[in-house]
Structure formats: C-alpha cells, structure tokens
Amino acid sequence: MAFLLELIPIIAEAVTDAAPEIIPNVIDTIPEVAPEVGEDTIPEATETAGEGGGGTAAAQSASKVPVFDMTASGTTAGANAAQQAIVQGAVAFGRWVATQAAKQALFYAGMKAVTAIFQGLTTNPLYAGLADEVLSTNSAADGLHAATNAWAQWSTAHYDNRASYGSVDVMGTSMTHFAILQSNLGALNDILTTSVAPALVAFKGSSAYPDLVTLRAALLAYAQKVKAQSDSILMYEALMIEDGLEFYGLAIEQAIAALS
C-alpha cells in the first residue's frame, strides 16, 4: 500500500507544471495585517458509527477522545468514507488514503503555483506586502500538509495494528481509536477541499488582497482543526505515539502564527 503514496509527489509536480500563469492586478493599498479568525472547538462524539472491536488498552470515555461533529457541513462524507474503507479491508483502506492524498496534492500544488508567481514580486513596492503574505501563507500550508500527510502515511502502515490502540464508547457504539483518527482525517480533508480550496481558486483568479484575506482566514480555520487533532493525539493517543505517530505540535503552532 505504501507505493500508492509514492505517486503523490509525481501528481503534485505535474499539476504545478500545468498551472496557468497568474497576472497580478494593481493593488493601491495593502493592509499589513489580515483579520484574525476565532478558534473553533471540536464537539464531542455524536452519532458516528465506526469499526467495532476492543483493543489491548483500557477503554476511555467519549469525552476524552474529541471527535469532529459529523453533522457539520462538509465533514460527513469524508468521515463516512473513512469508516467504509476501514471495514472493507487493507486494500480498500490503502486506496482511500491514496485518494485523500491526491486531493491534498492538487490543493498544495495550486498553492505552490500561486506562490511561484509572487516570489518574484517581493522587491516590487507595489506588490511587496501582498507577496510577503502569500509566501507566509504558503509556509503555513507546508506545515499543515506535513502533519496531515504524515498522519495518513502512518495510518496506512499501521492498519493491521488498528485494534491494539484501544476502543471507546461513542454514544453506545464501540469505536476504535484508529477509526476515530481516520474519521477525523477524512473530515479534515473535506474542510480543505470544500472551504479552503475554493478560496485559493478565487485568489488565483483575482490576485486581489481581499481574496487573499479570505484564503488566509479559511486556512486558519482549517489549521485550528488540525491543531485540535494534534492536541488529541498528544493527550489521548499514547499507544499510537509509542508506535511512531507524531503530533506535529510545533509545525502546526507555527502555521497558525503565520496566518494570525
């Protein structure tokens, strides 16, 4: 299954090479700081059903394993697809992970294409402020991608050990910690593709500062969700950490700081 993930850099490179050139618009004034977005909180487990099966670790209460609200707009499809892939077996799960990685690769390739245009404008007085913010946005995106991509690759490599990380009761349904993690990763991918990607498309089309503000706000909201997942790993997934899962706290904090 690991070979599927090796295809993603090739996809990203191809998309980058094919990305259309952007001609920046004239911008009269560029504010120095984009408005901040308040941090959203991840609600507790709701109606999610997942893969059953106990593990070797003691069960934890649902309140100690934060789960995305699967009824929230834009998160249901990815979370449900993750659960279906888990129960369908290793091959189906590997394909699902590769598909999610490909979707992310398209977004980040688009981000790289935009950044490449503005890299040459950092010394231009007319565009310097905008270019600097584009570069900081790209840096934040890189940090977030490093985290979510590593979590996905770890999940693929540790699929066979999924029951060993324990289970939790979620509204009367036994759900493995591994299944919860996959639901969250699916939900994160939904947020990226349905909320952040359209903002990137809009900015690519306009190169206008208001659209960059919208992109940064959307990416910041996404980053706060990624941080919530990172915090959950650190606090409640000791068995996964012992098995090599990293929480990427510093990289995510730096991404949030760059976007705030």
Image: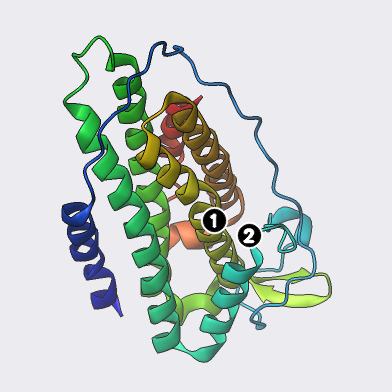
Q: Quadrant of residue 242?
A: bottom left
Asked whether the beta carbons under mark 2 and mark 1 sit within 8 Å of each other, the answer is: yes
Crowdedness near tag 1: few (<14), some (14–19) or many (≥20) residues, C-alpha within 10 Å: some
| Residue holding disc 1 | 194
Name the side, left or right, on which 62 lies relative to 7. right
Which secondary structure, mark 1? helix
Q: Residue at x 52, y 36 (%)?
A: 220
Apparent side of residue 114 relative to residue 236 in the rendered image (left or right): left
Which disc is residue 74 wearing?
Answer: 2
Q: Out of 24 and 185, give the one closest to the viewer.
A: 24
**137 and 170: which is toward the camera:** 137
Residue 85 point in image, percent of width and height: 52, 82
Q: Is residue 15 above or below residue 121?
A: below
Task: Say which label, 2 or 1, has the lower sequence index.
Answer: 2
Q: Is residue 257 above or below residue 60?
A: above
Q: Type of residue at label 1?
A: Thr
Q: Is residue 53 above or below residue 130?
A: below
Residue 41's disc number: none
**How far apart are the two marked residues, 2 and 1, measured between alpha carbons?**
7 Å
Under circle 2, the secondary element is: loop
User: Is 123 in front, or is 173?
Assistant: 123
Count residues near mark 2 (Cα–Cα under 10 Å), then give few for <14, some for 14-19, many for 20+.
Answer: some
